[in-house]
Image: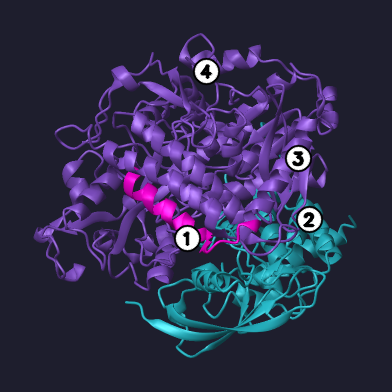
Amino acid sequence: MSAAINLTLKIWRQKNARSQGRFETYKADGIDTAMSFLEMLDVINDRLNKEGQEPIAFDHDCREGICGTCGAVVNGRPHGPLKGTTLCQLHMRHFKDGQTLVIEPWRAKGFPVLKDLAVDRSAFDRVMQSGGFVSVKTGQAPDAHAVVVAKDKADIAMDTAECIGCGACVAACPNASAMLFVAAKVVHLNILPQGEVEKDRRALNMVKQMDAEGFGNCSNAYQCEAACPKEISVQHIARLNKYHRQASSKGE
Amino acid sequence: MLDPKIPSGPLKDKWDDHKFNLKLVNPSNRRKYRVIVVGTGLAGASAAASLAEMGYQVDAFCFQDSPRRAHSIAAQGGINAAKNYPNDGDSVRRLFYDTIKGGDFRSREANVYRLAQVSNNIIDQCVAQGVPFAREYGGYLDNRSFGGAQVSRTFYARGQTGQQLLLGAYQALMKEAGKKTVKLYPRTEMLDLVVIDGVARGIVTRHLITGVIESHGADAVVLATGGYGNAFYLSTNAKGCNVTATWRAHKKGALFANPCFTQIHPTCIPVHGDYQSKLTLMSEGLRNDGRVWVPKTPKDQRKPKDIPEAQRDYFLERKYPGFGNLVPRDIASRSVKEQCDAGRGVGDTGMAVYLDFAESISRLGKDIIKERYSNLFDMYEKITGENPYSTPMMIYPAVHYTMGGLWVDYHLMSNVPGLFVLGEANFSDHGANRLGASALMQGLADGYFIAPYTISDYLARVKPAAKDAVDHPEFKKTEHDIHERVKKLLSIKGKRTVDDFYRQLGHLLWNKCGMTRNATGLKEALAKIPKIREEFWRNVSVLGSGEDFNQALERAGRVADFLEFGELLVTDALQREESCGGHFREEYQTPEGEALRRDEQFSYVAAWQFNGVGQAPTLHKEELKFEEVHLAQRSYQ
């Protein structure tokens, strides 16, 4: 059963990438606790629109936790307080009447703010372009059963492939590192026989591109795992480091 | 009568023989041709990557911030293929037959057969890309069964097969983008198609961050922009899904086929409030282990666990013992509606039925159910606050997929030369109802294995001319029209928000053109839509400017197109005086309440020609000829 709560929102407003941002305070009264967080923002935007004020820009699309488009830092935590949950799947029943919520965009050098809560994550696409693939062309594939894959390896590949590329790991990291994202992709492909051929190039090139995009390095704060809506483990960063070390030692 | 250009010869040889007859472009000449691909879901990303690998110059556009976010990503359950790895009697012919029958005999035999043929190549390709399909301990791929089939032919990757297949295609696209054979245009929305001398020559786009309106010339344009399910406002589609690309192409001459064939998915989380922004699907895969039931007594307020077995009606198992809970989606949805309309629905609104796992959990144990469905159970609990391991899920049907789309011939080319349409955006393979796990199959079949051949054939017949195309006055004129439209939307400064109009249209379409339809209701909708549209252009409020990131402006443009498209959807539903698949006209049903097809009169594709906003469209027909399958009333009993 749902109830209504009243909240105070402090939301980051920034006109565009070039301008200075600031927090604005909004009253959010009569919020149904069955709403999702983004539906709550819809309601606020509807009210702003009716008052003639420009709505708050925020990225979102599928609203079922899989496209990775949405995300904001709520009271200091990317995607809000609920573990393993994207912002769109966070529901208002997890907040208390009278609470103040501070809502701000991902903050990282690699993710410049575009407007309000929306950031530019195209750096992730460029990291992917540097090696996040298997070099197989359409038509080259052998029968799917030509190569068997041990279930434990297939399961690790799947665990890492669950990454939705939302960027919460970067937002959570004190160094704004993208190591969890890069690790998830490298491990997904490197651990499978299909991706093994390119494992050295992949690890070296993706880490290099990550650095070039201005993401920091990993200092084992583990904030990324805590923030990850797919709960991807920091163990994979250790695996990435191993792949990277092995590749570097070959002098490639 | 429209000519689908189906090759002659026996059904099983058509595609192979035809591939030999298709013209080729010499490898060294391919780089002279530019192909625009709009949309980066399964169909778009796979086509863009494959065309680039062949050597063409490709421009790939998406409105999302990254190509990886296209809505194919949300598909949960799986992808079909006729591998017959489980040795349970599957074959290309059986997949073909199930798909034709599942579509209620309103799709093209030749297209569907080709789809079944290439289905196996898709699985091979995806595995080679590193798609982490579920495997057994022996290292081989696992399969599950899905609605409308009696074999296990569905490959899956936990509950996120769509994301994994899309990442495979996206990674192939990134591989090409890294080599600069593909140029990516994210956050860029196609706002019009440019047709010069009857031929598709490019598109005009708006950049969603800067507001810049720009022309792009090409030798061929591929639309892979998805379906129009969001016409209903509430659907399982992502918020950004829209009809704009296909609708604007329709206004430029492309025929729109079978728009009334819309799929209502039976297992979605029910509506819970006016502010609701979308509906969430619970995968059809759940019906492998979940049993659908309602209390036998109407308005029974007891908790589900307090209702004894004898007082429950497992209505799908009772009505369709052959397929039980795994009947196709259209049939399951209508059965659920029938129970709720009879007052046996459950939950606060009475618009829900139970999907109960208690029996499976006691038979298989909680751990196995958890391994199969944990992400879906978690999602359900996040949204509803209820734990489906201990209390049954509540579900209700919601708009999910649209079988209709732009008309295409066997080459997946529309009636406008140079304009190809792939995936959900075309109408081609699913007839009046799509079977589960077949959308992913079709999107990838179109993009990886069909369009690269047929687009090459088209390009081999034209001279490369993309470079100078944008100098043509038609591009300037189109840009001007878009500027004017943006200016107009911002200048109305009315009293109602975009979403206010959008909800009004959605409710109307859901009530009058939803799970069941009748002539009176459809005529009512046809009278009301122009009035909503007229008020929209007089009284909508869109704040902000056209020169920056303005999400209300984006939405306004899309809703304006839905307000035109809705009329075509209803017109088509009114015209089709029969029931088939997802299109159920109350006037045409069997004594048992099943869909009553009228093959004599309606065994055709209805392809509509645009004649102006508010003007009656012209109906063109493509006759459906069935040479291999025998038309029968679908039975899942």
* Element at label 1: helix
Question: For the residues marked 4 and 2, what is the alpha-carbon distance in whole angstroms?
Answer: 41 Å
Magenta region, main secondary structure? helix
Question: For the residues marked 2 and 3, what is the alpha-carbon distance in whole angstroms?
Answer: 16 Å
User: Which residue sits furthest bottom?
Assistant: A98
* Type of amino acid under label 1: Asp
Look at the picture and state if B526 lies above or below B420. below
Residue A248 in view here = yes
* Type of amino acid under label 3: Asp
What label sits on residue B59 in the rendered view? 3
What label sits on residue B4 in the rendered view? 4
The answer to whether marks 4 and 2 sit on the same chain is no
Mark 1 and mark 4 lie on one chain; the one further toward the N terminus is 4
- The reply, left or right, for residue B288 in relation to residue B208 is left
* Type of amino acid under label 2: Arg
Q: Circle 1 is placed at which residue position?
A: B500
Residue A205 pos. (x, y %)? 82, 56
